Every structure is written in C-alpha cells, then in structure tokens.
Amino acid sequence: MSVPAPRVVQQPGSGPRQLVSDSLVIARRDLAHIRVIPEKLLDVTVQPLMFVLLFAFVFGGVIAIPDGGYREYLIGGILVQTLVFGMIGPATSMASDLGEGIVDRFRSLPMHRSAFLLGHLLAALAASIVAVTVMVISGLEEAEFEYAGLNVVFLLKPLSPDLLLSHLHLILQHLQAGAA
C-alpha cells in the first residue's frame, strides 16, 4: 500500500513573486509621499549641488594637498556624504510607520513579512540613483571648469546645474498642482 505524499500548501504572502509584488507596493507608497511633500526631492537634488558649490568655490582654495588638488577628492566625498544623509529620510519614515501602528496593520494583511523593509529599501535606492545622477552631472560640470584647457567634450553639457534646478522647479510645481 502506498502512502500519498503530503501536499505542501503555501501560506498567502510567502512566495518570491508575492515578496516582489508586495515590496513594489510598499516602495510605490513610499514614493507617493513625494507628491504630498515635494520638499523630499530637495534632499537628493539641491543639497548635493549646494555642497559641491560650497566646497568647490568657497572652501576650495583653503585646503592645500601636496601632489594634487582638493577638487579631485570633492565629488567622491560629497557623494558619500549625500548617500549617508539620504538614509535619514527612510529611517525616519520607517520609525514613524512603526510608531503609528502602520506596521501592525501590514502584519494583519496577507503580505510577505520582508516586504516592508524591502519596499523602503527600493524607494531609498531610487532616491539614491537620482542623487548619484545629480552628483555625476555636477561633477562633470566641475571637471569641465577645472580642466578647461584639455579640450574635453562632455556629453552631458546641456544638463548644467542651473538648467537642472530650473527643471526641478518645474517638476515641483507640477507635483504640487497634482497634490492639490
């Protein structure tokens, strides 16, 4: 007599497909807060530009480095600083969700347990990609200013920081109009 194999029943919210789906929902929820509070974009767009301009032009001539220049280390340092400062927002958001009981509501839903953390991670990754893009563009602009005698052609020249700020202003106005 043969005994049938036990049937494995997956719990709701336990598969990898469900994890990805739930994480994207949480990330979308986190990114939707930008429509309500568009100032969250300032952390990843204006703040890196402000620090590059401040440390390049205001403090640029103060520090003397032998066999090199201060500006060669500037973009790397500001990039690390921007990524570290960028983690404050998601950490605060997760702490407030935990304190307000939203995480308890998510636990009562048939969703993957890791989706809350992974969703916030994906939203923070999207913000970091924007911050790194702004830093690379401003770094190329700074490099063009620094090495003007080398006749280097920069492909991202149309995306100068003043043009980026004007586009950011238009995006913020559009988001505020959409939230109203």
Image: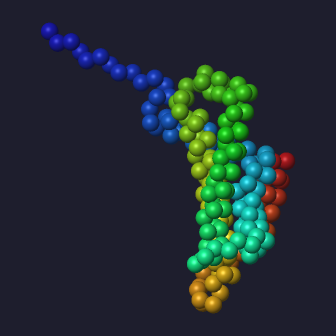
From the viewer's perspective, is residue 148 above or below residue 6? below
> Residue 17 location in percent, x, y?
46, 37
For the view shown, which residue lies furthest in the top direction?
1
In terms of image quadrants, where is residue 47? bottom right
Q: Quadrant of residue 48?
A: bottom right
Q: Is residue 100 left or right of residue 104?
A: right
Q: Give the residue drawn at x 74%, y 48%.
A: 34
Residue 106 position by quadrant: top right
Classify residue 179 as left or right of residue 87.
right
Compare residues 23 and 64 and report the one nearer the observer: 64
Look at the picture and state if 145 lies above or below 180.
below
Q: Residue at x 62, y 57 (%)?
A: 80
Depth check: give the residue in front, 71 or 95.
Answer: 71
User: Is 118 above or below relative to 169?
Assistant: above
Image location of residue 175, percent across then percent down: 78, 54
**Which residue occupies the foreground of this view, 173 or 69?**
69
Asked whether residue 62 appears in the rendered view, the answer is yes
In the rendered image, the residue lying farthest to the left is 1
What colouring does the structure picture have? rainbow
Which residue is depicted at the point 77% across and 67% down?
54
Picture layout, residue 58 above or below residue 112 = below
Could you tell whether 97 is left or right of 68 in the image?
right
Q: How many marks?
A: 0
Q: Residue at position x 82%, y 58% from top?
A: 173
Instruction: Name the quarter where the N terminus is drawn.
Output: top left
Q: Picture coordinates of residue 156 (x, y %)?
A: 63, 76
Q: Can residue 25 be seen at all in this image of the molecule?
A: no
